[in-house]
Every structure is written in C-alpha cells, then in structure tokens.
C-alpha cells in the first residue's frame, strides 16, 4: 500500500470537488507501482451515469495496456466502490483495491450487494479499506453540506 | 412491451456474435417508444471491461438526451443484466427493464447480488424477464459452444 498513490487519488477527488462533481478519485497502478490511469468522477460533465472515477480509470487503463484485463494492477479509490464499480473491478481482474472511506448508503463491497462475496462474482480482488479515510470523508461531507446549504 | 424493440436488441446481439464478442445487445427507448440508443457488447474491440451492451447504450442515451438521467426511458436487453449493469441502470434512472434470458451464473437482477432488492439501491426500475428468451439463449449457447470446440 502506498500513501502517495492514495494522495494522487485524493488529488483527483479534489479536482472533482472543484468541478462540482461528487468528489471521488481513483488511480490504477501496475505491479511496478507505475500509474497507468488516474480519473475522477465526471457524471455531470459527461452526462454519463456510469462515469464514476473507477469506471473511467478502468477504461483508461484498458486503453493504456491494450487489454480489457488489468491483471496484476491495483486500484486506489477514495470511497468504497459502489455496486456498479465493484462489478467493473471484478471484470477488469484488478488484483487489489485500496479504498478510503466506507459508504454504508451506496457501497457495494462491504455494504448492500457485497458483490465480491457473491457466487456470481468470478474474480475477487484483495480489498483494503480505511486508507486516508478521514481526508476522503471530510471532502465528501463538505461537498454534500455545501449542496444542502 | 414491444417485441420489435427486443428484435432490435437481438439484432445488436447478432452483430456482437459476428464480431466474436459475447452476443448481448441492448436498446433504450424514450416514453414515445423512440429508440435513443442501441448498442452491443464491445469488451474485446474496445479493450474495455465495462463495455457491456447496457453500459454503452446508457452512455449513448445520456449523450443523446443531454443528461445522465434517462428518466421515463426503458431498456431492452437480450440477457439478464450483470451486477455492474444493474448498478448503471439504477444510476441512469431507467424506468423499465425488459430482458431476454436469465443468467444464473452472472446475473445481478434475479441472481447473486439481486441489486434492485438491496437497501443500497436508490432507484428500482420495473423488471420484466423472459422476452424472446429462446432466441437470446440460443445465440449465447451457440457462441460458447463454438468457443469450446
């Protein structure tokens, strides 16, 4: 686990925040620790309900590696992936997922569908949560508070 | 429910078959029954693990309508959506899902995660399965048999 890679994901989340998008960022690294993709939430900008940080990073990673399978690659993401993204992570064969704060309302890894624990999940990454979770959670809380105010 | 719209989805699935992709096709229509997006599985072609027919149709529909929310739109898809696609369908606020054959091994609607039944699912479409299921299933069976032979 690399704190500096989670910082890169947090930088992406901050860019989303500045752009008025739900602040979530993601980075994918290969087994040499080289960044092959970095992305942030762009749902509103792209008018695309699927444009979560993880999905955009997986798509960029596939383009970079020339394969839909990101074998031996790891994902850093500031928020627990939702069910859609958990499915995408499994299809992309990502090796490990490091995430920031938990998402009891919308998470699909440790909550709700708990997708990686389902018999219909055919590739299970290793998962490590709680990485830089205070910073990741604070940014999300600030974003939603400003939305309400 | 329109049989001819499912036929359009089957035509898309057939194009996927001819291209060597898992034969699944999808169509999205607005509440006037006008087709706003049609797509097929392109995972291998696009080197993109997320390039399922439903995801590509949702992205194209958002572009067409200028919004990430496809409110009052319906999806026709030849196979029970997987967990990733079920998540995307919910985020896109699709009104109804008509699908062809069931997918006990990889489905995320009636199997495994059963995403629309989770408390973490915040928009539930109406779902109708078994539309043109024999034709949809036969194409998939033929595809996987040829893969094995």
Image: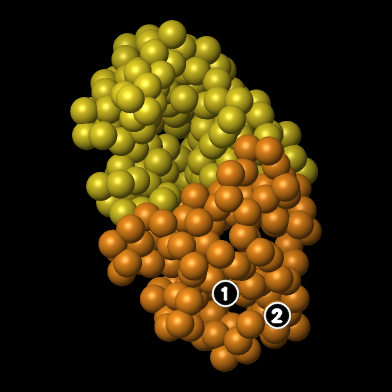
Chain colours: A yellow, B orange
- Regarding residue B29, the answer to whether it shows in the image is no
Compare residues A70 and A47 and report the one nearer the observer: A47
Residues under labels 1 and 2: Cα distance? 9 Å
- Which residue is depicted at the point 54% across and 80% down? B9
Residue B76 marker: 1
Chain under numbered label 2 = B
Above or below residue A116? Residue A48 is below
In the rendered view, does A104 fall on the left or right side of A31?
Answer: right
Residue B107 marker: none
Above or below residue A123? Residue B104 is below
Residues under numbered marks 1 and 2 in contact, where contact means CB atoms less than 8 Å apart:
yes
* Residue A51 in the image, given as x and y percentages of width and height: 37, 46
- Which residue is depicted at the point 49% across and 69% down? B73
Q: Image quarter for residue A136?
A: top left
Above or below residue A145? Residue B57 is below
Compare residues B12 and A83 and report the one nearer the observer: A83
Q: Image quarter for residue A117?
A: top right
* Residue B86 in the image, given as x and y percentages of width and height: 60, 54
In the rendered view, does B54 fall on the left or right side of B112?
Answer: left
Q: Image quadrant for the C terminus of chain A?
A: top left
Compare residues A15 and B33 and report the one nearer the observer: B33
- Which residue is depicted at the point 66% across and 29% down? A111
* Residue A112 in the image, given as x and y percentages of width and height: 68, 35
Residue B131 marker: 2
- Which residue is depicted at the point 64% across and 72% down? B98
* Residue B77 in the image, given as x and y percentages of width and height: 58, 72
Callout 1 crowding tier (Cα within 10 Å): few <14, some 14–19, many ≥20 = many
Marks 1, 2 in one chain: yes
Pick whichever of labels 1 and 2 is earlier in the sequence.
Answer: 1
For the residue labelled by badge 2, is the local secondary structure a helix, a strand or a loop? loop
């Amino acid at each position: 686990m690399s704190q500096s890679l989670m910082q890169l994901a947090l930088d992406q989340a901050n860019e989303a925040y500045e752009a008025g998008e739900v602040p979530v960022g993601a980075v994918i690294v290969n087994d040499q620790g080289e960044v092959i993709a970095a992305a942030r939430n762009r749902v509103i900008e792209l008018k695309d309900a699927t444009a979560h940080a993880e999905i955009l990073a997986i798509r960029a990673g596939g383009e970079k590696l020339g394969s839909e399978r990101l074998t031996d690659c790891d994902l850093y993401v500031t928020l627990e992936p939702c069910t859609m993204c958990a499915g995408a992570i499994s299809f992309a064969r990502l090796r490990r997922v490091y995430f920031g704060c938990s998402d009891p309302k919308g998470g699909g890894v440790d909550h709700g569908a708990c997708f990686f624990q389902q018999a219909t999940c055919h590739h299970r990454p290793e998962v490590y949560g709680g990485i830089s979770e205070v910073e990741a959670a604070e940014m999300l809380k600030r974003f939603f508070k400003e939305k309400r105010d």
